[in-house]
Image: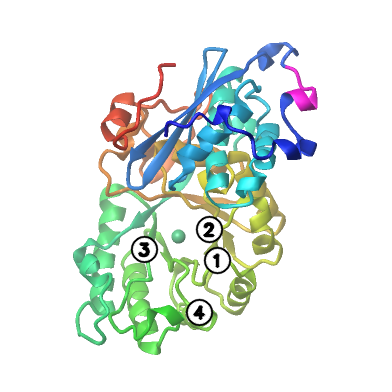
Amino acid sequence: MGIDYSTLRDPNSEYTMRDLSADAMGVTGDRGGGRDVEITDVQTVMVDGNFPWTLVRIYSDAGVVGTGEAYWGAGVPELIERMKPFVVGENPLDIDRLYQHLIQKMSGEGSIGGATVTAISGIEVALHDLAGKVLDVPAYQLLGGKYRDSVRVYCDCHASEGEDEERGTTEPDNGERTGRQVGAASAKEAERVVEELGYDALKFDLDIPSGKERDRANRHLRNVEIDHKIEIVEAVTEAVSDRAEVAFDCHWSFSGGSARRLATALEPYDVWWLEDPVPPENHNVQREITRETSTPIAAGENVYRKHGHRTLIEEQSVDIVAPDMPKVGGMRETKKIADLADVYYMPVALHNVSSPVATVAAAHVATAVPNSLAVEFHAYELEWWSDLVEESVIEDGRIEIPEKPGLGVTLDLDTVEKHMVEGETLFDPE
Ligand code: MG
């Protein structure tokens, strides 16, 4: 990076009418107990995982270091570096105020969504690890305590056989990779993941091209394309339905009308949820589909902060809300979204593509809310995923909530160093 942001003019310095720093708020650390602690440094290392994971470390003068993680995304480490002057010198126990302080300070950069909120999320997760260690409590305790000792994990699956060739083809009606073929390969993989890896909850992609698309820009599904997707859903759900629940992800692909026809056509099948059938910006379309079908509809991973989730939840535009914790604003923001969803008796399924660090952090949130369905695991094809931390994280499709202080996982720095993105420097010692 090489830029010393502390020497640059703060673009928001003229607009500090709502400065939430400790100095401006008159908040002191002099209250006894563990409060007398200050943040001394913030560092990041980007690791080349199944996605680029941005690991975050917050150092303190109490000799304790907090580790967090932000969702992947270009520019996130630079944004965290940019925010460093706003957190150094602050008390890491004031997590809510620091979150709001960063949102306010970064408002010019666009802190209602995108990479700025993702970067703030990484800092917020690290604050939970640090605060838990200072106070000698597990992170879930900072969120109000536990509903469950372990949380369910669902495994995002890919049908290896033939799917890669299937992707990207634009050949119409070429007779290859029919829905039956993709369905058979997916069913075989579902069977393997259930029997060999021990999961009882799965997710498969449903936006796999059928080879029959005439125009991918208009989002319209012809009946023959819907039939292709029904064949996949039928094969997978029938293969494992007595042993596992199965969700299907559409990645914001279809028009409102096509999504409605697809969701209706899937009603006879045991679909756990149908995810992101339409683009994420217009919640009204999402709402109409949810109202008109009995197939459960989920969305949320491309929505930021509790404010972004407000209409999804208040208008019951989804059956299941699916925020991504290290992207949406962090652990407390996710807890607040889950609490708002619970006002509408709506379950939460946490989207997650992270390393073990943010995966465990998401599990701490999932145990602290009543309405958690499951937390995603998106890296079963990355054989060194679990090596990133010393502890075992996922066992038999569940995460046992750690009882150690903070997040309860310890980075294996040899693994971090081995897989960090070229040009990155390892964290300073604790
Ligand atoms: Mg998704």
Left or right side of 170 for 338? right
Q: Is residue 261 above or below residue 297?
A: below
Tag 2 or tag 1, which sits nearer the N-term? 1
> Label 2 amino acid?
Asn
Label 3, secondary structure: give it. Answer: strand
- Sequence-wise, the earlier of marks 1 and 4 is 4
Viewer-proximal residue among 168 and 297: 168
For label 3, the residue is 204
Ligand number 1: quarter of image: bottom left
Q: Nearer the viewer, mark 1 or mark 3?
A: 1
Q: Which residue is mark 4?
A: 255
Question: Residue 145, located in which quarter of the rendered image?
Answer: top right
**Which residue position is annotated with label 1?**
280
Q: Quadrant of residue 330?
A: top right
Magenta stretch in the rendered image: 23-28
Q: Amino acid at mark 3?
A: Phe
Kindly indicate whether the residue at mark 2 contacts the one at mark 1 (C-beta within 8 angstroms): yes
- Residue type at numbered disc 1: Pro
Please give the residue where the numbered disc 2 appears in the rendered image.
302
Foreground label between 3 and 4: 4
Q: Position of residue 263 (x, y in %)?
A: 49, 77
Q: Residues within 10 Å of mark 1 (few under 14, many from 20)?
A: some
